[in-house]
Amino acid sequence: MKTGKIIDIECGCGFKLFRYFKAGKGRIIKCFIRRLEADYVGLEGMDNFSKPLCPKCHKELGIIMMIRGQPALKLNQGTIKDVRI
Ligand SMILES: [Zn+2]
């Protein structure tokens, strides 16, 4: 059975960025864009190597890149509020 949990990912400033299905446990390093349940930033359709910004505080959230053939956001750990499950 596949384990996982839906979590809200927030910026350090408190803005809610995404709702994401996290498979397994541990720290979130990257988010596969197709696995976002809600996208309050608008990652869908962004180009590879784009650096999306927090709509509220305008800090860089990370960088879009292909991971195992799928577009994903590699999170900037300094910006994203630490979430552990
Ligand atoms: Zn922010």
Image: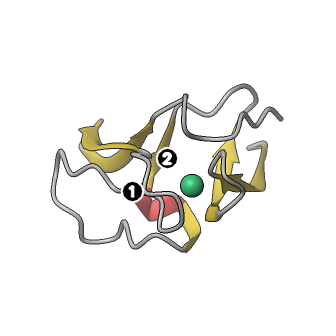
Q: Camera-side residue: 3 or 61? A: 61
Circle 2 residues within 10 Å: few <14, some 14–19, many ≥20: many
The amino acid marked with disc number 1 is Leu
Q: Secondary structure at mark 1?
A: loop
Total residue callouts? 2
How far, Cα to Cα, is label 1 from label 2?
Answer: 15 Å
Badge 1 is on which residue? 53
First of labels 1, 2 by sequence position: 2
User: What percent of the width, then of the height, locates residue 8?
Assistant: 73, 58
Q: Secondary structure at mark 2?
A: strand
Q: Residue at the location (47% across, 68% down)?
A: 55
Q: Quadrant location of the N terminus?
A: top right
Residue 81 percent coordinates (x, y): 69, 40
**Pointer 2: what residue?**
31
From the image, which quarter does the C terminus lie in? top right
| Camera-nearest label, 1 or 2 | 1
Q: Is residue 34 left or right of residue 35?
A: left
**Looking at the image, residue 32 lies above or below residue 46:** above
Which residue in the rendered view is the most extreme toward the right? Answer: 85
Query: Is residue 9 left or right of 7 when viewed as pictured?
Result: left
| Ligand 1 quarter of the rendering | bottom right
The residue positioned 68% from the left and 27% from the top of the image is 27
Check disc 2 and give the amino acid type.
Cys
Q: Which mark is residue 18?
A: none
Query: In the picture shown, does residue 60 fall above or below 38?
Result: above
